[in-house]
Image (cartoon, grey):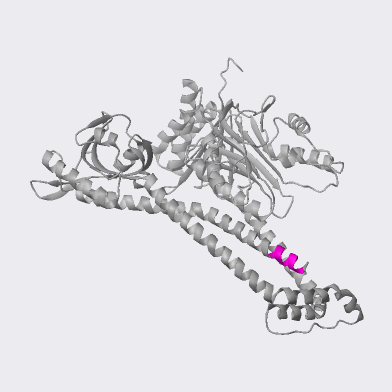
Amino acid sequence: MKHSVFRRITLFILIAVLVAELATMAMAFKVIYDLNLERNLNSIKNHSHTLVELGRYYNYDNPDSTSYLSYTLEEYCREANLAYAYIEEIDLDKSTETYLAVGFGDNTTEVAYQQRYPGVTIKGEIYKEKLAALNGDTEHAIRHEVNRYGDTLIYYSQLDELLDNDTGRVVPTNRNLLVGVEVNISDVMFSFARSFISVVGLTLILAILIVLIFSLILNHNAAKPARKINERISSFVEDYSKGFKPLEIKGKGEFAEISRSFNTMAQNIDSYLSNITALNQEKHKRRAELDIAGNIQQGLLSPPHCDGNGFTIDACMLVAKEVGGDLYDYLVLDDGRVFLTVADVSGKGISAALFMSRAVTLLHMYAQLGYSPAKILTEYNKTLAAQNPNGLFITTFVAIYDPDSKKLIYSNAGHNIPYILSDTLIPLTQAHGMAAGVFDDECYEEATADFKDGDGLFLYTDGVNEAGNSDEALFGTEALEDVLRGCLSAEGVDIMKQVLAQLKDFVGDAARSDDITMLVFRSKSGAFHRELNLTSRAELLSTIYDTIAQIPDLSEEMRMNLELISEEIFINICSYAYEDEGSVQVIIDAGDEATLTFIDSGKPFDPTREVISIDKYNHDQAIGGLGRYLTMQLCDGYSYEYSDGKNKLTIRKSLISSEKR
């Protein structure tokens, strides 16, 4: 029996070593393959650069010169084991390539000799890699091609300088000349495979020898001591209750150390108990680390409220554990469009938070690059899937709102269906794809929804609809839709309060098992809103005029009235508010009514007081009296206040004609 057990151990070790060896070699195969491919790529790059230096000193309009260059290229191919090397001229207008000089390697195909020779012109698509080389983009000038000339790896370099026969100097040329260097993939891979198989064979033989030697040593030095230790361990409990008798320690080997450790085990029990306090301290330290990670996560999120140009955003996130996997984000892009997203990482804890922080960074970057929602998700998924060692995935909804066209363009990577809050509740069910981070080749679609002034968008994570109570029932999508129908026109904060109140009533005392994240985007009614920060210079009045002209559907009469009001107020500020120049903020809002607000930090002055009638006007005594009279007559309402050292005058003018009132 003892020999049978030992043989099993030996066989197990042998199998384990072989499996580990095979697994290691399998993983190493790709690494060695990539290194080999990179080495060959660097080699052909170096050959290409060498031929660029060589090609500068030939006259490509001289057949003798190009013939000699072809001979030189052929010699170079044979020495460097290249498949082909050539210099060609690209005609971008005609989409043609003309071979000026060609060198063939030893393994060149017969078809290449017949179709690739100096002077031949080929018409067709100019590959993007050649265009990249002509534009100086060396990173994308590499191409893998399988055609009648073979399976080759090609690198292109631009030949941008040529020898000037008159001056004898190398000068820039305006000809589109490329140097192409090709190497056969089959030759490279055959050499690689042969070397790799040799290494694998040698490694396996070495592993088997090591296992055999190890088994002999184990048989001699381990079996007998192991039996003795096993006998004492079998009687350990009984011996310990009667007073433990230590094992006899012989020698200085590993089994002697095992015996010594076994003898001290009983003594260490008391020490283990004393370590409970230290373990509790470590637990508190772990808690502190999670709190720090949670603070970092919260710091990555956008503020919970944003009052923007024609819109408001309200958001909240309640985590179920120390560090959650939910996120929301928004961003006002340079062109005035608004980027919105809500996402949910699979799992919880620090790994989910770190994955989430990476997702936020990628979404921000692609949005700022001006990508559409579908392209944002496609690139975002590709990047996450390429480096995802923990196998996480993230559901993500992305939308971009255009305030000018009042269009919402969106794309969905496996996330909950959002809703538009309009006259009715509208689910955004189109453009629904797979969660991000799983497959790097996933492509996403996008859809467009119309927005009216005052419409809203409700985004959320599954912590809302999948919230459970003590009976293991879920809150559900229908209950959420009922809440939303009851507050279609409410402010974002009030909508979230209503949802959270309903969730609290439903869940009761049950522990929250998932994060709850919500975001409400709402366009403002009368969404035209502009803020101008000017200096008190009269010539800047034209800037106010230009902004007024941007108000949609503004009649000519209304435009002239608003310009007259603006001129009177702005010129008075420029003339009397400051000793020198100062700042003037002009805020223009328009819907059914236009509101003009002028804010300056000049001398306190209330233009709405003591507005005299036209028959009592005295030009020598009144400051802007006539203009103030005309302004107050033209407007439908006005107000003034002085606070924090600033004058604030607000003028209201209805934009609805008298016939429609």
Q: Is residue 594 visible?
A: no
Q: Position of residue 420 (x, y in %)?
A: 65, 30
Image-quadrant location for residue 589: top right
The extreme top residue here reads 659
Foreground pick, 79 / 484: 79
Image-quadrant location for residue 235: bottom right
Q: Is residue 604 above or below residue 611?
A: below
Side (left or right) of 627 relative to 413: left
Foreground pick, 561 / 529: 529
Q: Is residue 344 visible?
A: yes
Specify the quadrant that holds the N terminus.
Answer: bottom right
Image-quadrant location for residue 116: top left
Specify the quadrant that holds the C terminus.
Answer: top right
Which residue is rendered at x = 58% and y = 49% of the image?
A: 388
- Is residue 5 covered in magenta? yes
Q: Position of residue 277 (x, y in %)?
A: 79, 73
Q: Position of residue 626 (x, y in %)?
A: 47, 31
Side (left or right) of 179 relative to 22: left
Side (left or right) of 98 relative to 399: left
Main secondary structure type of the part rendered in magenta:
helix
The extreme left residue here reads 166
Q: Is residue 222 above or below residue 45?
A: below
- Is residue 634 covered in magenta? no
The stretch in magenta equals: 2-9
